[in-house]
Image (spheres, rainbow, N blue to C red):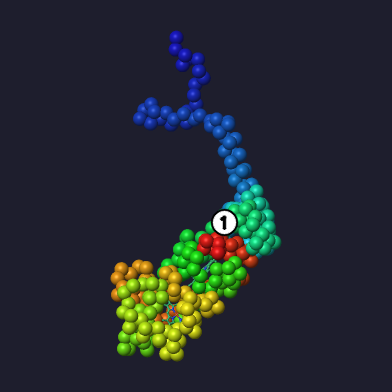
């Protein structure tokens, strides 16, 4: 016995194609219809609450509002959007609250208190790393190693402007302008080579002719060159003018370490003497919050060996 005969006849649309091909007229399942209506209602409610349709160059913002704080502490209320929601989250999240507490602690601590408290120091190291990457690494390199001739290496323990916390704090807050005049007049009579020989001898570079070194010394230490005004008689540099120490083996501008032969080293020093130097470290006070400058000061001080 066939089961088909027990079923009620299925309604068709009444059309027939190719003689016997019929189209059924089944109603949509009820659950499907209700789900469909629910999505329509949901969409309408959503459009009213949240940003939805473009209107000209603007869009419908929706009636739901969100309040968050901007970076400079101003409270802003705007129509709900993901960006504002994100800003609100990072401000009120557990991490953000902890971070703010730490920043406040740092703001209220002296350098000595930060250095002697392992927890504060640990915070400064990790926060400083991020702040350095955001603001300083573009010039000084991600590890602070700098680029010879362009941006000072902050990792070695040699400082143009001084390596105490106070010196570094002043450097970052107020910026620095490193300036050495050009001495094109020494291009004549091999004078520049003599001066370069003398400068290289100061840090123990072998290869200069002793008569030439003597001639260079006379110019450096005399009124003709006047190099000692800025570099001092001992040629160890002065942090008040940011002049380099010429007696250590650390080079800021002349790429002596990168030169293979004595001749090339001399050419590097010659280039500095004939061309002079002018380069600027930007001012950060007013561009970065005070506690950020404080954190960066300790961070950079630590990079340089903490001396
Ligand atoms: C636009 C490039 C640039 C940026 C960005 C920059 N610096 Fe500098 N910085 C320099 C230059 C150039 C000098 C060298 C100035 C000179 O010749 O005396 C310098 C020098 C310094 C010195 C002094 C080094 C010494 O030997 O005394 C410190 C410290 C320093 N920068 C820290 C920072 C920190 C921290 C930041 C991030 C807040 C930063 N710099 C961002 C270019 C930059
Ligand atoms: C007005 C001051 C001033 C005078 C004068 C001066 N210098 Fe300098 N010199 C500087 C400063 C400042 C720097 C470092 C610049 C910087 O890194 O921003 C410097 C850097 C140098 C360097 C590069 C050192 C390095 O680490 O790469 C050499 C070499 C040098 N001076 C040699 C001389 C000689 C030789 C004379 C005389 C002919 C002279 N300077 C006169 C201010 C001076």
Quick one: 9 or 214, which is closer to the camera? Answer: 214
Q: Is residue 215 above or below residue 23?
A: below
Q: Is residue 274 visible?
A: no
Q: Residue at image x 38%, y 26%?
A: 20
- Mark 1 beta carbon near ligand 1 (under 8 Å): no
Quick one: 51 or 11, which is closer to the camera? Answer: 51
- Quadrant containing the C terminus is bottom right
Quick one: 163 or 96, which is closer to the camera? Answer: 163
Asked which quadrant contains residue 103, the reply is: bottom right
Q: Is residue 221 above or below residue 124?
A: below
Asked which quadrant contains residue 266, the reply is: bottom left
Q: Is residue 259 above or below residue 46?
A: below
Q: Position of residue 262 (x, y in %)?
A: 31, 73
Which residue matches tag 1? 125
Tell me: 205 left or right of 114: left
Q: Is residue 114 visible?
A: yes
- Quadrant containing the N terminus is top left
Q: Position of residue 134 (x, y in %)?
A: 52, 61
Q: Position of residue 58 (x, y in %)?
A: 57, 61
């Amino acid at each position: 016995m066939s089961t088909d005969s027990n079923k009620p006849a299925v309604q068709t649309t009444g059309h027939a194609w190719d003689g016997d091909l019929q189209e059924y007229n089944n109603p949509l399942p009820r659950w499907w219809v209700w789900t469909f209506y629910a999505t329509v209602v949901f969409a309408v409610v959503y459009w009213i609450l949240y940003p939805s349709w473009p209107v000209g160059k603007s869009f419908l913002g929706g009636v739901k509002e969100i309040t968050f704080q901007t970076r400079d502490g101003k409270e802003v209320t705007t129509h709900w959007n993901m960006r504002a929601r994100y800003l609100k989250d990072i401000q009120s999240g557990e991490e953000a609250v902890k971070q703010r507490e730490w920043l406040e602690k740092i703001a209220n601590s002296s350098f000595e208190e930060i250095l002697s408290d392992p927890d504060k120091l640990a915070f400064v190291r990790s926060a400083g790393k991020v702040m350095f990457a955001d603001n300083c690494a573009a010039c000084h390199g991600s590890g602070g190693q700098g680029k010879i001739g362009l941006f000072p290496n902050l990792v070695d323990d040699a400082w143009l402007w001084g390596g105490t916390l106070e010196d570094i704090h002043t450097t970052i807050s107020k910026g620095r302008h490193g300036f050495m005049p050009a001495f094109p007049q020494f291009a004549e009579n091999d004078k520049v080579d003599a001066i370069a020989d003398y400068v290289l001898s100061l840090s123990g570079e072998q290869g200069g002719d002793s008569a030439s070194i003597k001639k260079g010394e006379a110019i450096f230490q005399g009124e003709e060159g006047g190099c000692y005004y800025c570099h001092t008689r001992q040629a160890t540099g002065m942090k008040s003018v940011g002049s380099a120490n010429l007696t250590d083996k650390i080079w800021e501008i002349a790429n002596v370490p990168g030169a293979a032969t004595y001749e090339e080293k001399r050419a590097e020093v010659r280039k500095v003497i004939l061309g002079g130097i002018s380069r600027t470290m930007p001012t950060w006070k007013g561009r970065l919050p005070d506690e950020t400058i404080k954190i960066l000061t300790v961070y950079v001080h630590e990079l340089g060996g903490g001396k």
